[in-house]
Amino acid sequence: MAVAVGTAVLGATLSALPASAAAPNFVHVDCSAAPSGVADGSQRAPYTTLEEANAITLKAGDRIRFKRGATCLGTFAPKGSGTSRRPISIGAYGPGRARPVIDGDGAADTILLRNMAGVEISGLEVTNAKGPASLRRGVYLLLEDFGTANHMVVDDLYVHDINGNDAKDIRGSGGILASVGGEAKASNYNDLQITNNRVEHVTRTGIAAVASLWAQRAEVGSTVITKPWTGNTGIVISNNNVLDTGGDGIVPQTALDAVVEHNRVHKFQQRSAGYNAGIWPWNSDGTAFRFNEVSGGATTRDGMAFDIDQGTDRTLFEYNYSHDNAGGFFLVCNAAGRVANAVVRYNISQNDTFRGIETCSGGIESAEFYNNTIYIGPGISQTVINENNANQRNVGFRNNIVVKEGAGTASLNLRSGGFKLATNNFVNVGGAEADTTAVNGDPRLLARGTASGIDSALGYKLHRSSPLLAAGQSIAGNGGRDYFGNAVPATGPVSIGAYNGPGVHGPAPEPIPGPAVPPGPMPAGRE
């Protein structure tokens, strides 16, 4: 059944060019219509199969529209390129709100945009449920020996039931994937926008851009470089709703200064035998993650909301909300490469299980966790910081609130001496004495544990009686605002935790009781 999602519409229905035109300008496809034998792509005589649509070579400014409420079976694989000023536009036509459906019908790809540039696609429903557990991709952007592809926009699609296998990387399975292959010529994307999409029940990955063979560099552990790192630029992944993925939720890769913001990921790592997280970068520099909400991660492989993975420099996570993930809040994972200049600030974690911050086998060159609020409610146990070996790390952990309440335990497992703790507030956390400058006492959170979404976390503001107001240390380059939009000064004292506004008046919150049980053994981490 077609589902109407979002409001973006690319263009309106116009009269078709005469069939005698040298090249198509406005192409109509209605797979519900009976073949006429005289189809020319006009609205009166639309193409009725994907094969007819695929036979056209599109040019800058061309538009191809699918009939609302009609279903086309097979792979839609157009050809040609537009420009950023005159893109090829792919969308819907006809009355009503029902989306045109492209059903892959068991093919590896439902929509394949290979070696194309200057394309905007919107308003379609994309599915491929037939013959599950084989290689499947919903929308697949692929460059091979192409060079730079400018301006690719994937907007307002409903991608669902892409029942693929557990493969990932450039030819893996998933909902919306952008990849670079080729052997002779380095290729990359510039101005790739993946926005306002709903991606639901896909395996393995929800959204990934850009998995590339041209990704080799020492920072990711490459020792022999035959396809040097060729960064993808202008990547924006925003306002997507990703629900029920077999593996990862959203993964930017081989990217330079990508922006990942205002996304919702729920129920990831549902069907994979591998390691998967909610939102994370790999082999990318300068990635900014803001205003994302991640929940419902399953298993402890990895199963946490966020990860800063190997081969990354200048990664920033700020103003995000994580909750109810079986694998925990955050992974910082390096094996044989590099993680450097990472910053995690002004985020909230509520009722994440197993671990707060987990490390992998390798060292960490530099990372900072500051002004985050971590709440661990009744019945939940968490190793707040878990170093699973003593390899050297250089990680600051400052101005954070960590509260454990009710049954279960919370503790620190510090082994490398590389976590530098200062001016944190720990409540009912074993090993908290490692922070010799901790600010003790009940933080007086207004309504701890009551957040129902990223925009409904008012319970993590501080009451005016809180000892944490203006009790933290200033940190250079702090971003200038807290989780709630309050200003954070560049110098002078700041509050501890994700809130830096004035103390809130009203009745004082109920005190946090002491630990219900003594701290127990700490869980083993990922090796």
Image (cartoon, rainbow, N blue to C red):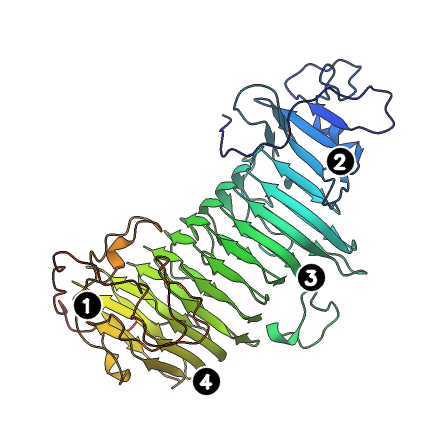
- Local crowd at mark 1 within 10 Å, few (<14), some, or many (≥20)? many
Q: Is residue 523 above or below residue 204?
A: below
Q: Foreground residue, 245 or 100?
A: 100
- Drawn side of residue 354 relative to residue 173, left or right: left
Closer to us: mark 2 or mark 3?
A: 2
- Local crowd at mark 3 within 10 Å, few (<14), some, or many (≥20)? many
Question: Quick one: label 4 or label 1, which is nearer the N terminus?
Answer: 4
Separation (CA) of disc 4 from disc 3: 30 Å
- Local crowd at mark 4 within 10 Å, few (<14), some, or many (≥20)? some
Q: Is residue 182 above or below residue 333?
A: above
Quickly name the residue at label 4: 392
Q: Amino acid at mark 3?
A: Leu
Separation (CA) of disc 4 from disc 1: 36 Å
Dot 4 falls on a residue whose secondary structure is loop
Q: Amino acid at mark 1?
A: Ser
Give the percent coordinates (x, y) of residue 265.
Answer: 43, 49
Quickly name the residue at label 2: 61
Quickly name the residue at label 1: 466
Dot 2 falls on a residue whose secondary structure is loop
Residue 213, numbered label: 3
Residue drawn at the location 28% of the way across and 82% of the way down: 435
The C terminus sits in image quarter: bottom left
Separation (CA) of disc 3 from disc 1: 52 Å
Q: Is residue 15 above or below residue 86?
A: above
